[in-house]
Image: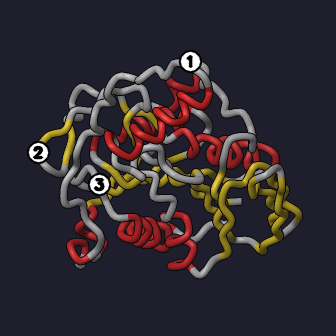
């Protein structure tokens, strides 16, 4: 079984982001990690291959610095990796999906493709759908339970309100993993050392022939979230507080 796992190099959610210019941010001193949701997909892929045999290949679209995240993924049990190098901090999900498709077709299509349900930086939640569309494969997102039965994948996903949906698909397919699917392993020291010797094939984005990047969605301007003003404590009876709250919403905040 050959499995691709799409892993994104993202800022740690605890990092303090400082904007640089209108469309970027300072990233030289920020800690980057593997997108947390992608780790659930990676753990599932590694476990499947451990049980059934095969190969897990990491595919990443990102800057050269993404190799640190890739090494961490390799330490979790992936066999090799492919890095599509870009210069931009942000790339439209459509372009990302097309880059992933091109690399996978060149390397040889797999039995399964895992992604996270979304990335914690841009949170577009589009890449897995676009990738599946370009490859002509079935896709299901937010998968919290997965069973492989021969050439079929049986996926269970949360639909809200405590309800669950079970979807059966033929392999190959694209699976968007989420919390609850498994518990990602912590690499041991020997695994970290072995990961240093595993192959990371680097491919320049420009060589893929995706020539209409600037025609896709782009960022016009980034702005920091405005700081919240201090809270206003309302006192008095319930009637007095409600009256004052309505006045504030109408006259001060002008939202009514």
Disc with the residue nearer the chain's start (1 vs 3)? 3
Vertical placement of residue 104 versus 82, above or below: below
Looking at the rendered structure, the number of numbered marks drawn on it comes to 3
Residue closer to the observer: 4 or 244? 244
State the residue in front, 220 or 71: 220
Name the residue beneath numbered marker 3: 90
Q: Quadrant of residue 15?
A: top left
- At numbered mark 3, what does the secondary structure look like: helix, strand or loop? loop
**Residue at 23% across, 67% down:** 206
Q: Is residue 163 above or below residue 32?
A: below
At which x and y percent is residue 77?
A: 62, 37
- Please state the horizontal and vertical placement of residue 237, each as a whole percent of the image: 60, 22
Q: Residue furthest right?
A: 149
Helix, strand or loop at label 1? It is: helix
- In the image, which disc is placed on residue 21? 2
Q: Is residue 167 above or below residue 42?
A: below
The reply to whether residue 197 is visible in this rendering is: no
The answer to whether marks 1 and 2 mark residues whose Cβ atoms lie closer than 8 Å is no
Rendered location of residue 216, percent (x, y): 28, 74
Residue 187, horizontal then vertical, whole percent: 60, 25
Residue 191's image quarter? Answer: top right
User: Are the residues at dot 3 and dot 2 in contact (C-beta closer than 8 Å)?
Assistant: no
Q: Residues within 10 Å of mark 2 (few under 14, many from 20)?
A: few
Q: Which mark is residue 189?
A: 1
Horizontal relation, residue 227 to residue 51: left or right = left
């Amino acid at each position: 079984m050959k499995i691709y796992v799409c892993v994104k190099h993202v800022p740690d959610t605890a990092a303090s982001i400082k904007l640089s210019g209108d469309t970027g941010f300072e990233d030289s001193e920020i800690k980057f990690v593997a997108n947390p949701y992608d780790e659930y997909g990676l753990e599932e892929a590694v476990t499947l291959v451990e049980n059934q045999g095969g190969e897990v290949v990491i595919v990443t679209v990102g800057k050269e610095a993404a190799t640190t995240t890739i090494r961490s993924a390799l330490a979790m049990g992936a066999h090799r990796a492919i890095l599509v190098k870009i210069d931009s901090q942000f790339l439209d999900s459509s372009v990302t999906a097309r880059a992933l498709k091109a690399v996978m077709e060149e390397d040889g299509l797999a039995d399964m493709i895992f992604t996270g349900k979304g990335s914690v930086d841009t949170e577009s939640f589009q890449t897995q759908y676009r990738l599946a569309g370009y490859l002509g494969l079935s896709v299901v997102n937010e998968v919290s339970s997965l069973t492989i039965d021969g050439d079929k994948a049986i996926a269970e996903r949360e639909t809200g309100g405590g309800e669950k949906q079970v979807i059966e698909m033929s392999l190959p397919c694209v699976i968007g993993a989420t919390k609850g699917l498994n518990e990602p392993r912590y690499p041991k020291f020997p695994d970290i050392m072995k990961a240093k010797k595993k192959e990371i094939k680097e491919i320049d984005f420009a060589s893929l022939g995706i020539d209409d990047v600037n025609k896709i969605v782009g960022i016009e301007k980034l702005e920091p979230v405005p700081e919240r003003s201090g809270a206003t404590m309302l006192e008095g009876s319930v009637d007095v507080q409600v009256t004052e709250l309505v006045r504030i919403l109408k006259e001060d905040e002008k939202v009514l």
